Image (cartoon, coloured by chain):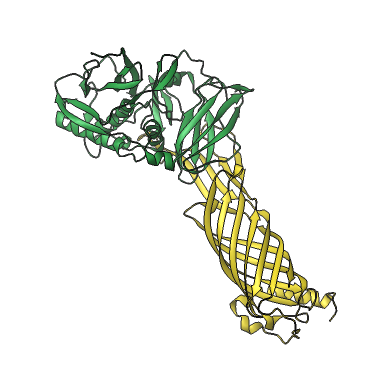
Chain colours: A yellow, B green
Amino acid sequence: MSGAATPKAARRWLVALSLVPLWCAAPTSASAQNYIPQDVPRRGSLVLSGGVNWAPGYDLGSSTANETRNPGSGTGPFVLFQTSTRIESAPGLQGRLGVYLSPTISVEGGGLFSRPDLSVRLTGDAESAPDLTATERLNRFVADGSVLFHLVGASFGGGRGVPFVFGGAGYLRDLHEKNEVADTGHEFHFGGGLHYWFGEGKHRAGLRTEVNVSRRHGGADGADTTRTVPTVAGSFAYLF
Amino acid sequence: MKSERSRLLVLIAAVALVAAWQIPAFAYLKLGTKVGTRTVTLKWSQLPIRYFITDRGVSGVTSTQLQQAVQAAFATWDGVTTATVSSQFAGFTLANPTSGDGATVIGFQNRPDLDRTLGATSFMIDTVTGAIVESDIFFNSSFAWSVSAQGETGFFDLQSIALHEIGHLHGLAHSAMGETELRAGGRRVIAAEAVMFPVAFASGTILGRTLRADDIAGIGDIYPSASYTRETGSISGKVTKSGKGVLGAHVVAFDTRTQTLVGGFSLSDDGSFVIAGLSPGPHVLRVEPLDDGDVESFFDPTLNIDINFRPQFYEKVVVVPQGGGTSGVELKVVAK
């Protein structure tokens, strides 16, 4: 096996990425006849990874600053101004340490950190205060744990590319600006990804890419709110 | 009234007006008085507040119905979990609701000369401690009153006006959380989001029987309960214009999650303000000036209240910590 990815291998790599959701739904149907090297990760193998992630922005909803209208002076509440709140998209960092329980199953723990802006768009002031977007920067931490199922049967590139699916749960901690106020919550996540190893030995480096869908409850989004937040990530990984 | 300490009778012009000259504004405000060189908040030092009801009804309202409406209004304030106020009906009396007799008396009084005043609250305070020792409330029997559960067209709801006046009795001044419009002979309220707004809703409605977030924050600020200290927070800072403090600016905090409005004023020459009793979480801030017509409803008219600046929002989201405060906010306003 050569160490450099051929154009064909690269194509297959891209195809494999696009198939991740399919594998999630029907992992057994994607098996392929690939050569699997002897030194696949074994029980007790560790994998350390670190890289970057990105989460898109999402709306937290709109609200109105209403006053109670005096009967006879109109209908409906008097709107003083309106707000629309968002968590803006932001890149982040992540790191994980995993241990293989078998060649196909590993568990890992890790953390994510990002600094998204919490923004509130203020419009429609009853006394013509200029529209404005008020912001603050969050320090967002997620500590989580996952179980990974490595789809060895769907590996490619001579066993270097190994897709995986995963699921787990985590703890959220959003620190508001000045780090004086913390909003906490929890999350459940699942997703799929790919390990691509640059070698075959027991110790090897590689790349990891993944798509993660997190179902989050609490945090800066609000104590009683639950939202679905996707994240894409790319990391360097080291197996030992 | 006998006392070892000198006491000063202070008639507060804290009244509910039918069509007074007011403008839109926002905030709760506490009543204060000078004790020596310092200003102290007017409040009761002894609870429960024991009050008497004048045993005299008016057309459509018996003295018993008056007592029930007043008791319901007191119960509304007593029910605020973030405050420690409590009250007790002490009985009927033949005394008029006038200050100086040592008893807190609430009742009707015929004041046709006050043709825009639905009710008024007066105080007797201890000038050494600032503690309220007596407070009286009169409802102007020149107006038509009702205690109907649904309200009655053409009649002012007694419980609503009692709720406002009892807010004064507790030490709250007027809130500016409301909007008005100019009409012949004065202004009419368009909307309000505080029972303590100085202009009453139209007759026939009972909307004034419900306390709003601004009222609740205000009463908790004066009589904080353990839950007030534990569960609410504050925002403090200053309002400046060209680097100098702005006195009398309205600053309102809006909680985007609970959609509640609570306000405060900049109360010193350096523009400092504090808004307390806020729900924890992100808030946006808005500042606006008082117009000339508002000043006397809120401040001593001799104060140099700055009204020459434009309403605006603060550019940062301010997060209120539970049981704590966020400080250092500076709202920089610009002249009109």
Q: Quadrant of the N terminus of chain A?
A: bottom right
Residue at image location 32% in from the left, 34% down from the top:
B208
Q: Position of residue B74 (x, y in %)?
A: 26, 33
Residue occupying the far bottom of the picture: A33
Task: Examine the rendering and report whether any part of residue B258 can be seen.
Answer: yes
- The residue that appears at 60% across and 40% down in the rendered structure is A134
Residue A70, image x and y in percent?
A: 37, 34
Is A146 placed above or below A94 here? below
In the image, residue A186 above or below residue B80: below
The quarter of the picture where the C terminus of chain A appears is: bottom right
* Above or below for A240 versus A178: below
> Residue at left 34%, top 41%?
B81
Quadrant in the rendering for residue B113: top left
Q: Position of residue B97 (x, y in %)?
A: 22, 20
Residue A152: give x, y in percent of width and height.
68, 81
User: In which quadrant of the rendered view does residue A19 lie?
Assistant: bottom right
In terms of image quadrants, where is residue B238? top right
